[in-house]
Amino acid sequence: MDTYDVAVIGAGPAGVMAAWTAAKQGAHTVLLERETAAGRKPCAEGILSEVLDDAEMPPQNEFATNRITGAFLYAPDEKRRVRVGGEGYILDKPAFLRSLAERAGASGAELVFGARVDSVSRQDGAVLIEGRRDSQPYSLKTRAVIGCDGTGSILARQFFPRRNYPVIAAFQYDMTDCQLEDESKLEIFIGHKKAPAGYIWIFPKGKGTANVGIGLKGSGAKSLLDKFIQDHPNVFNHSKIERSQAAPVPVGGEVEDYVTDNMMLCGDAAGQVIPLTGAGIHTSIVAGKIAGEVAGAAAKEGEVGSKRLSAYRERFEALWGEKISNSLKALESFERFSDDELNIITDFLDGQDLVDMAHGFRPSKAVGLMVRHPILAMKVAHQLIS
Ligand SMILES: Cc1cc2nc3c(=O)[nH]c(=O)nc-3n(C[C@H](O)[C@H](O)[C@H](O)COP(=O)(O)OP(=O)(O)OC[C@H]3O[C@@H](n4cnc5c(N)ncnc54)[C@H](O)[C@@H]3O)c2cc1C
């Protein structure tokens, strides 16, 4: 039976990074992906430029499909929109993941596509992985395992009791022939009537193509998105739907534990998503990068226990822990405001406030709001201290 230092399950953003950094440490590393290629999961593919910095992957035409220079956030009544700054890209995510996977392969990781993991168990201090590859059973042993296998993670189901792991539904169309005002801007529409406790997005990919989707609490994603498209004939009158896809997004913040003995979880599997926006590419890239580096070094030195591997948790928490928990608070607050209140709040905030809001409300803003809308300000203040 093949034996590895580090096995990574899943070739999403977390997995391709973890395989790369583990292999760079000189660890004998395998990456197991059930699909025959990376990037089959639906995604709006929006990232800030910092994501590529953290991935240590300069932008390339092959995957950086469209340059983005900010976003318009529309109030529920759409009478006002706020311009939000920020530079980034809409990716061709399968091509991006392919580049990251190839780099991991060039650093020595063994990439195995079409290899589903069906079971993970402990055996003599090591980990036994069993599954099917091209409908044939396979098994391998590893010193350490990193679960980068998304919301339905097999490693989480077997070894990490994710008690608080709420997910929301996200549904998306790939569209062509959209009449967009400015293809360098994301468009985001909030309002509980349009998308209860969520939002609708139009992420332009250039030349009239766009990822058009909805994330919301509860059911009815498709019919609400169809209604939105119908209500915006200026954008969608001539457009075509090329593909529709749906997937869950974890929005409850990080799971209680994501390192135990010689096992780690990264990315969506660990709830490492910004709850208010549902963005998880950046956090997954960073988590995978750190986890692979820590596991690779530990496995090389034969010390793959929790004590050594918890350095991953410490390093990730220092970078993202507070942002994720503040954003969860902001999401909980956002859910409690009515559409009328959101119209007023949107009117009051500027673009930078909205960026800050994604990482938690700023108390100073509650003071300004107090002058113009005292009752609403008290509600905001209550959310801040509760
Ligand atoms: C519709 C939608 C739009 C989104 N838009 C954005 C966006 O614009 N920007 C952003 O930052 N984030 C976005 N996200 C979130 C982002 O896609 C995820 O947070 C991110 O992809 C998580 O990366 P990951 O590596 O943890 O997991 P995933 O990307 O989910 O990858 C997991 C991988 O594991 C594989 N796998 C699962 N189980 C097994 C198994 N048993 N054996 C082998 N392989 C397995 C899967 O096939 C998959 O390739 C969006 C999510 C959705 C659903």
Image: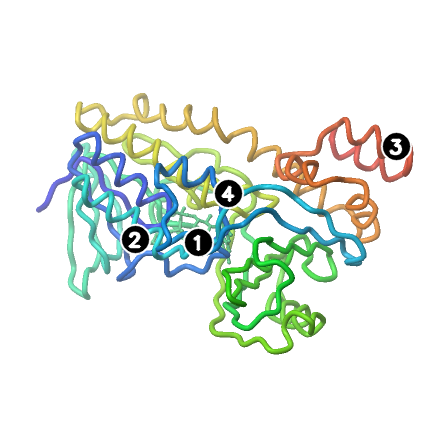
Is the distance from the Cβ of mark 4 to the nearest ligand 1 atom less than 8 Å? no
Q: Secondary structure at mark 2?
A: helix
Q: In terms of sequence position, does the residue under pointer 4 or pointer 3 come before the other?
A: 4
Work out whether residue 87 or residue 159 is closer to the camera in this orientation and state it. 87
Name the residue beneath numbered marker 2.
98
Q: In terms of sequence position, does the residue under pointer 3 or pointer 1 come before the other?
A: 1
Work out whether residue 52 or residue 133 is closer to the camera in this orientation and state it. 52
> Distance between the Cα atoms at labels 1 and 4?
10 Å
Image height of 303 relative to 209, above or below: above
Label of residue 91 in the image = 1
> Distance between the Cα atoms at labels 3 and 2?
50 Å
Callout 4 crowding tier (Cα within 10 Å): few <14, some 14–19, many ≥20? some
Q: Is residue 85 left or right of residue 172?
A: right
Image height of 170 relative to 82, above or below: below
Position in image of residue 241 (x %, y %): 52, 74
Callout 1 crowding tier (Cα within 10 Å): few <14, some 14–19, many ≥20? many
Q: In terms of sequence position, does the residue under pointer 1 or pointer 2 come before the other?
A: 1
Work out whether residue 149 or residue 123 is closer to the camera in this orientation and state it. 149
Amino acid at dot 3 = Met
Name the residue beneath numbered marker 3.
370
Position in image of residue 93 (x %, y %): 40, 55
Name the residue beneath numbered marker 4.
48
Amino acid at dot 4 = Leu
**3 vs 1, front mark:** 1
**3 vs 2, front mark:** 2
